[in-house]
Amino acid sequence: MTNNQLAKKPKPSAQIVGSQIAKPPRGAINRPQSRTRPGALPLPANRDVCAFTKPNVFDRWTDDAAGVRSLERGDNVITMFEAIGEDFWSGGGVTAKKVASQLKGIGARPVEVHVNSPGGDMFEGIAIFNVLREHPQPVTVKVMGMAASAASIIAMAGDTIEIGAASFLMIHNCWVMAMGNRHDMRETAEWLEPFDQAMVDLYASRTGQDPKQIAKWMDAETYMSGSQAIERKFADSLLPADVMTVDDTAKAREAEINEIRAMELSLVSAGMTRSDARARLNKIKGTPGAAIEATPGAGADDWSGLTGLLSSIRSK
C-alpha cells in the first residue's frame, strides 16, 4: 500500500461491511463461559489498507515488555509474542490464517491465548478477533507484558481475560499514514471513523463502560496497568507473577527489530512507499531481501551497523 493509494480510497459507505455488533458466534449457546462473547467486527472490503502501530508504541514495548514469555506449555496454547500481521523484518508475525490453523489443530477444546504484542495491523487484529470468537469452547486470554493496539482487540475475544500486575493493555484510535490535499484528508478521516466507532462498541460491550469515556481513552492513547485494566473491566483477574519469565535473548532481538520498524515508519511518513523504505533499509543493512533469522546464532544477519546508525540518528 502506498500513501497515495490510501488517500484515493472510496467513501466509507463503499468500504465498510457493516459497523454494528453482530449476533452471538456459532457455538456460543450452552457452553460454559464467563460472559457473552462480543459479536463480529467489520473489516474493510479492500484489505490493501493497513493500520499501523505507532513507533512510540514499539519503543514502549521495547522498554517495558519485550522478551516477556510464558512458563506454561500445552497443546491447547496459542502464543502471540510478535507484531500482529505479517512482519517483514522478522519473517514472522501473528496472522488470522495462522491462528485459524492452530485452532483447527486444537479442536473442540478450551484454548488459551498468551499475548505479549505491541500490535501491528489493526485490520489483521480484527480478523484474528473474529476467528477466536467463533471457537466453540471457552477462550482464556493471558496478557503477559503488553497487549497494545491491535493486540488489545484480540484480547477482547477472551471469555476470560487475565493480565499480569506489571503488564499493560493499550487502546487508541486507528492510526494510518496518508498524503493528499484537505479533501483527501477529510475522505480518509471519514473512512476511518466507523472503525474507531466499532472499537468503542467492542470495548463498551466487553467492559460495560460508558462509550463516551472509552472514546476519550482511545483519543488519549491510554495505557492501563494490570490493576487498572481489571478496575475498568478490560480484564477479569491478575496473573500470578510466577507464570512469566523474561527471555533476555528474545528481548535484545525484539529491541533491535523495533528500531528498524520505527525507521521504516519514519521513512514512509516522509513520503516513501513501504517497498522503497524497506529496500533502502536493506541496502544499508547490506543483505537485500533478508529477514532476521528466527533462531539467534543460526546464521543471523549482522544488524549492528544499521542499528548503530539508527541510534545515532534518533539521538540527534
Image: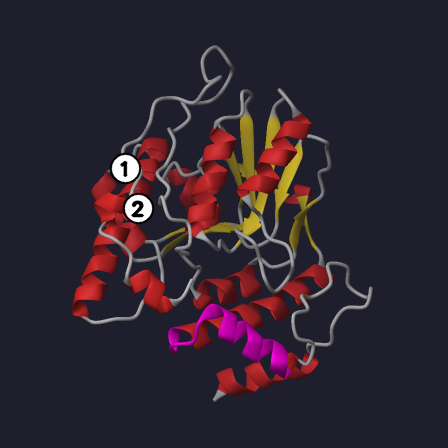
Q: Which residue is mark 2?
A: 195
When asked about the image quadrant of residue 18, the answer is: top left
Instruction: Looking at the picture, tell me which residue is in the foreground, 122 or 97.
Output: 97
- Residue at 74% x, 72% y is 301
The residue segment tinted magenta is: 269-284
Q: Is residue 40 left or right of residue 147?
A: left
User: Of the residues shown, which amino acid type is indicated by label 1?
Assistant: Ser
Drawn side of residue 127 relative to residue 144, left or right: left
- The residue depicted at 38 percent of the width and 77 percent of the height is 271
Q: Main secondary structure of the magenta part?
A: helix
Q: Are dots 2 and 1 in contact, CB under 8 Å?
A: yes
Residue carrying label 1: 19
Residue 47: numbered disc: none
Check the picture and name the quadrant holding the N terminus.
bottom left
Q: Position of residue 90 (x, y in %)?
A: 64, 61
Would you say residue 176 sits in the magenta stretch? no
Given the image, on which type of amino acid does mark 2 rest? Phe
